[in-house]
Image (cartoon, rainbow, N blue to C red):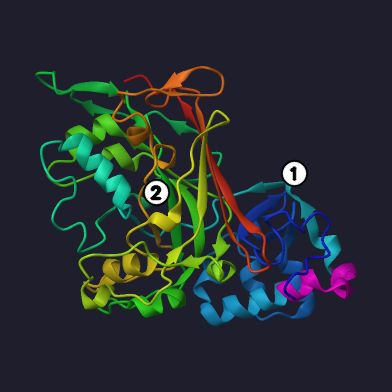
């Protein structure tokens, strides 16, 4: 079927043809939420189609979350994808399927799965180097452990929200270097972080590490992720234990999860790891992903971070996350950390783009930013090579900044 497209109107060349088929959860009018797949500018309501075809996974389609489908495992993911591809490619299926295609404009998209645990990594060499140069200008920018393991921290699962959810400016303690003592109030250095999130489907047992070779058995798919950051709160609190309130107030994800199988032609070699990783972190190439991200602030493109530049691979993140025996649960989410490239226009945060607030960036309307202002809207989008020669369009993630509650 290579080179052919779906019979669904508008799907061909849209980034949402049969080689993509991202999953989401939607509500149509007053109906209960349930699982759908995007094809072109439509959502296919899977439950009635699955029931008509007596698909074994039909019960998972009627659920108000992707969790049951994610928990069904890789074999089920594969069979459902093969079934969907045939339905949406074969014109003879059109009469049966078309009544269950709902225009995107008529549905409400929801958080696609309940987040069980959230872990954020720090996998971009360029981002880690830039941060080190800003905050430790008289020392080596990378700390000694950075090239030996994927550095990460546990975040707050309960504040992961779906795209479109407004983001309230957080309050907390802040202390500028010139201040004698900290003050309390709204963050003055609110930032975005362009990241890629990985969604765990198949759980693992406590005490059993997941090797790099088993990555595809556990990871259901990927989603764009914005890890909002209050840089002033973070700078004061993070020594010696790391990020806490400066990160935990909100993390936004797309309502669409791109299946890992859709990225079969997007795998790319890592940029090179030196020294050689320890045995449990050694991966067979290609282990990186060729995904192009774009960051817009109030409609202006401010950065185009390339995921293919990331130093640590997704499989290495998962292996390190579990090497101590920590178990996986369905709905676990782990993120790449800020995606940044070597060029100025590829930096995935305002912290880097403005170099800590020193160099304002200019938006298309002539205004400038060092950090986010109330009312600003940030949108992440991304594309990846598709199996049929075009580009997949990952689900966007958007958030608008609301003023802080009165301190």
Rendered image: mark on residue 339: 2
Query: In the image, 81: left or right of 220?
Result: right
Query: In the image, 181: left or right of 106?
Result: left
In the rendered image, which quarter contains the C terminus?
top left
Secondary structure under badge 1? helix
Residue 169: percent from left, percent from top = 39, 28
Q: Main secondary structure of the magenta part?
A: helix
Between residue 118 and residue 211, name the one nearer to us: 211
> Is residue 190 found inside the magenta-colored segment of the image?
no
Residue 331: percent from left, percent from top = 44, 63
Between residue 284 and residue 194, name the one nearer to us: 284
> Is residue 89 found inside the magenta-colored segment of the image?
yes
Q: Residue at x 32, y 77 (%)?
A: 210
Q: In this view, does 354 lie above or below 274?
A: above
Residue 209 in view in this figure: yes
**Counting residues from the N terminus, which is met first, the one under dot 2 or under dot 1?**
1
User: Would you call the spot at circle 1 few (<14 residues within 10 Å), some (14-19), or many (20 or more)?
Assistant: few
Q: Residue at x 30, y 30 (%)?
A: 355
In the rendered image, which quarter contains the N terminus?
bottom right
Residue 164: percent from left, percent from top = 56, 39
Q: Give the range drawn in magenta.
A: 85-96
Q: In this view, does 179 lie above or below 10?
A: above
Q: Residue at x 65, y 53 (%)?
A: 26
User: Would you call the spot at circle 2 few (<14 residues within 10 Å), some (14-19), or many (20 or more)?
Assistant: many
Q: Residues under labels 2 and 1: Cα distance?
A: 31 Å
Name the residue tied to disc 1.
105
Q: Residue at x 18, y 40 (%)?
A: 238
Residue 217: percent from left, percent from top = 45, 78
């Amino acid at each position: 079927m290579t080179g052919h497209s779906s019979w669904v109107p508008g799907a061909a060349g849209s980034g949402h043809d049969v080689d993509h088929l991202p999953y989401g959860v939607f509500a149509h009018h007053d109906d209960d939420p349930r699982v759908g797949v995007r094809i072109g500018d439509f959502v296919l309501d899977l439950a009635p189609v699955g029931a008509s075809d007596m698909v074994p996974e039909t019960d998972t389609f009627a659920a108000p979350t992707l969790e049951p489908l994610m928990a069904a495992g890789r074999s089920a993911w594969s069979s459902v994808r093969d079934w969907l591809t045939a339905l949406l490619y074969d014109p003879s299926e059109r009469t049966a399927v078309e009544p269950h295609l709902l225009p995107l404009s008529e549905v409400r998209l929801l958080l696609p799965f309940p987040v069980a645990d959230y872990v954020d990594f720090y996998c971009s060499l360029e981002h880690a180097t830039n941060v080190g140069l800003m905050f430790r200008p008289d020392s080596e920018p990378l700390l000694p452990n950075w090239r030996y393991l994927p550095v990460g921290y546990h975040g707050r699962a309960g504040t992961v929200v779906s795209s479109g959810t407004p983001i309230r400016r957080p309050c907390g303690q802040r202390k500028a270097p010139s201040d004698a003592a900290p003050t309390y109030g709204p963050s003055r250095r609110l930032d975005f972080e362009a990241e890629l999130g990985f969604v765990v489907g198949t759980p693992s047992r406590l005490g059993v590490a997941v090797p790099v070779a088993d990555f595809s058995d556990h990871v259901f798919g990927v989603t764009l992720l914005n890890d909002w950051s209050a840089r002033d709160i973070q700078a004061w609190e993070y020594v010696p234990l790391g990020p806490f309130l400066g990160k935990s107030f909100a993390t936004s994800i797309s309502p669409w999860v791109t299946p890992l199988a859709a990225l079969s032609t997007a795998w790319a070699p890592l940029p090179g790891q030196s020294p050689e990783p320890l045995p449990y972190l050694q991966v067979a190439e290609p282990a990186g992903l060729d995904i192009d991200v774009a960051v817009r602030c109030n409609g202006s493109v401010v950065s185009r971070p390339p995921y293919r530049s990331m130093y640590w691979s997704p499989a290495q993140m998962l292996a390190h996350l579990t090497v101590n025996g920590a178990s996986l649960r369905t709905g676990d989410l782990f993120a790449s950390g800020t995606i940044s490239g070597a060029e100025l226009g590829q930096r995935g945060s305002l912290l880097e783009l403005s170099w800590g607030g020193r160099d304002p960036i200019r938006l298309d309307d002539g205004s400038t930013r060092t950090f986010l202002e109330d009312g600003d809207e940030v949108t992440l989008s991304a594309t990846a090579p598709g199996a049929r020669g075009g580009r997949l369009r990952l689900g966007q993630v958007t958030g608008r900044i609301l003023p802080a509650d009165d301190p």
